[in-house]
Structure formats: structure tokens, C-alpha cells
């Protein structure tokens, strides 16, 4: 029984800021009989959800505890500082951590950046979420450093951001429980890694009986070769038709077969 017939659902968890739409679209094209269920989970909770069986695979932000997990790193995000539009740092295209030394910088409880030393001055509180922090930044009470995707996710007209060149960066990865590496997980890994549907690990490889369609140039070459063979087969074995006719007349005038027939008649 195929997955399409069994009614399976592939559950994909993802942390805020990660946009799985591209991969979900490819899944829908290749696996129309297996719905993809997207589960948005706080970054700190994705691994726990995977281990508890609440999702088949998930996009996490590294580092994570990898015990029992298979992890494929995908990409690294630029870290930005989110500031009010009239803040001094907006005069530059990018800044460094040292440029923020005199600013109060929030460190939310769901921060996904791995800081050795926190930048700037400690803010008056640690907000529980990045969304809460963005509202405090808009109120002019401090700044916050986040992956660029989170700055875009929480975009506001009164805020902007600038890249911080020497800040830690967030790396996004695909993770799943190693002991639950199912066929559907393998299918999704293939999509994320850019494999085609007919690759060695694809779900729809071509069968041996299926032959690729001939290209127009190949068909034209084959037809030309067949026509040439047919013309050669119609030619006399002794040479071309235009040379054989005069030769026959010459033999007749010099006492060939035609002359012998004339002497026998007398």
C-alpha cells in the first residue's frame, strides 16, 4: 500500500522566522496524496516536539541538543539590530557591536543568538518573547538584535534595522528523530536538498520500460539515414543508372549480344 493510499500526513514543525512555503509547494506537487501539516512552534520547543512525536521533522535554529536527532544544516542568517527609524545607527549601512555600547539592548527569553558577551547596556527587563521586545523597541526603551528573518517577521512602519557585522549568527537546520527516518522523511530531505523527483532517492523514479522521448534532432538524423539507405538499395550493383545506359548501347554497336543475334538470324 502506498503512502497516498494509507492517508498519511507529514507533519513539519518550524521555528518563527523560518519560511517553509517554497518546500511545502514542491511537496504538494510531488506528493499530492500526502497532506503537509505545518506546525509553528517557538524555537526552543521544536526539538521537544520532535522527540515527543508531535512532528515528523522540523526546522530548528542551531545549536540544539542533538542526542537522538539527525541534523542537516541549511543556511546562516545575518544578524541585525532593530531600532526606531530616527535612531543614530540608521545613518550607517551596517554597524558593529561596539557601536551599540551606549544603548540599552534587550535580551528576550526566547533569544536564538548564542552570545558570549551580551552587547550594549542591560535593559530594564527581559521580555518573554521577541514579539514583546519589538513592541518595547517601538516605544523607544531599547534595542534588540535578532536574525534578519525575525526582524522581517515583526516588521513595523516605525522601526528599521541594520546588519551587525560581528554579532553571532543564527543557523537554520532540518532535524528529525534518527530512529524515525521514514520514507516520507527521506522524501522531504530530498526536496530540501534540491533533488529532482526522478533522482535515486526520489519517490517517482522512471521504470526500466520507460524510454526517454527522442529529441527532434535525433529523429531527423534517423529519418535522413533511413532515406539514404533506401536510395543506395535502389542503385544497380555495377554503378549509377546514368553510366550503365551508354555502356549497354556501346556493347550493342560493337558486336555484343545484339550483333550475335543478328548473325544467327541470317
Image: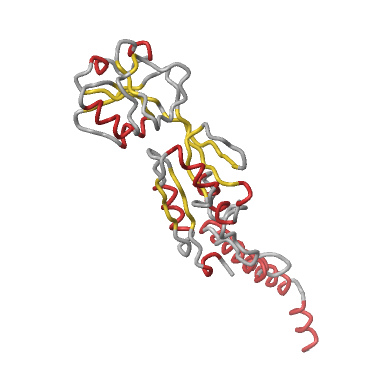
Note whether 63 is above or below 23 in the view shown: above
Q: For the N terminus, which image quadrant?
A: bottom right
Left or right: residue 166 versus residue 266 is left
Left or right: residue 74 versus residue 145 is right
| Point 57% across, 64% down: residue | 223
Colour style of the rendered protein structure: secondary structure
Q: For the C terminus, which image quadrant?
A: bottom right
The quarter of the picture where residue 162 lies is top left
Please tell me which residue lies in front, 191 or 221.
191
Q: Residue furthest bottom?
A: 265
| Point 22% across, 18% down: residue | 87
Count the labels in the image.
0
- x%, y% of residue 185? 56, 52
The quarter of the picture where residue 77 lies is top left
Please tell me which residue lies in front, 171 or 111.
111
- x%, y% of residue 217? 53, 56
| Point 77% across, 74% down: residue | 255
- x%, y% of residue 212? 57, 61
| Point 62% across, 42% down: residue | 68
- x%, y% of residue 248? 70, 72
Please tell me which residue lies in front, 221 or 189.
189
Amino acid at each position: 500500500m502506498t503512502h497516498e493510499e494509507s492517508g498519511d500526513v507529514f507533519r513539519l514543525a518550524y521555528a518563527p522566522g523560518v519560511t517553509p512555503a517554497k518546500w511545502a509547494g514542491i511537496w504538494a506537487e510531488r506528493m499530492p496524496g500526502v497532506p503537509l501539516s505545518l506546525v509553528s512552534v517557538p524555537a526552543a520547543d521544536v526539538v521537544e516536539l520532535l522527540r515527543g512525536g508531535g512532528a515528523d521533522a522540523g526546522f530548528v535554529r542551531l545549536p540544539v541538543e542533538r542526542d537522538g536527532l539527525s541534523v542537516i544544516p541549511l543556511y546562516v542568517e545575518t544578524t541585525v539590530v532593530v531600532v526606531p527609524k530616527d535612531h543614530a545607527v540608521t545613518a550607517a549601512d551596517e554597524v558593529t557591536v561596539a557601536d551599540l555600547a551606549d544603548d540599552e539592548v534587550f535580551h528576550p527569553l526566547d533569544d536564538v543568538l548564542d552570545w558570549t558577551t551580551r552587547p550594549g547596556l542591560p535593559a530594564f527587563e527581559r521580555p518573554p518573547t521577541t514579539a514583546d521586545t519589538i513592541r518595547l523597541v517601538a516605544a523607544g526603551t531599547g534595542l534588540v538584535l535578532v536574525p534578519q528573518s525575525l526582524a522581517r517577521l515583526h516588521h513595523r512602519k516605525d522601526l528599521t534595522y541594520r546588519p551587525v557585522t560581528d554579532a553571532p549568527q543564527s543557523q537554520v537546520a532540518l532535524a528529525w528523530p534518527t530512529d524515525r527516518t521514514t520514507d516520507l522523511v527521506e522524501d522531504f530531505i530530498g526536496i530540501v536538498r534540491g533533488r529532482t523527483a526522478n533522482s535515486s532517492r526520489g519517490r517517482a523514479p522512471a521504470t526500466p520500460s520507460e524510454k526517454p522521448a527522442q529529441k527532434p534532432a535525433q529523429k531527423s538524423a534517423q529519418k535522413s539515414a533511413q532515406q539514404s539507405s533506401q536510395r543506395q538499395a535502389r542503385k544497380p550493383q555495377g554503378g549509377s543508372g546514368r553510366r550503365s545506359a551508354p555502356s549497354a548501347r556501346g556493347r550493342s554497336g560493337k558486336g555484343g549480344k545484339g550483333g550475335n543475334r543478328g548473325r544467327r538470324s541470317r
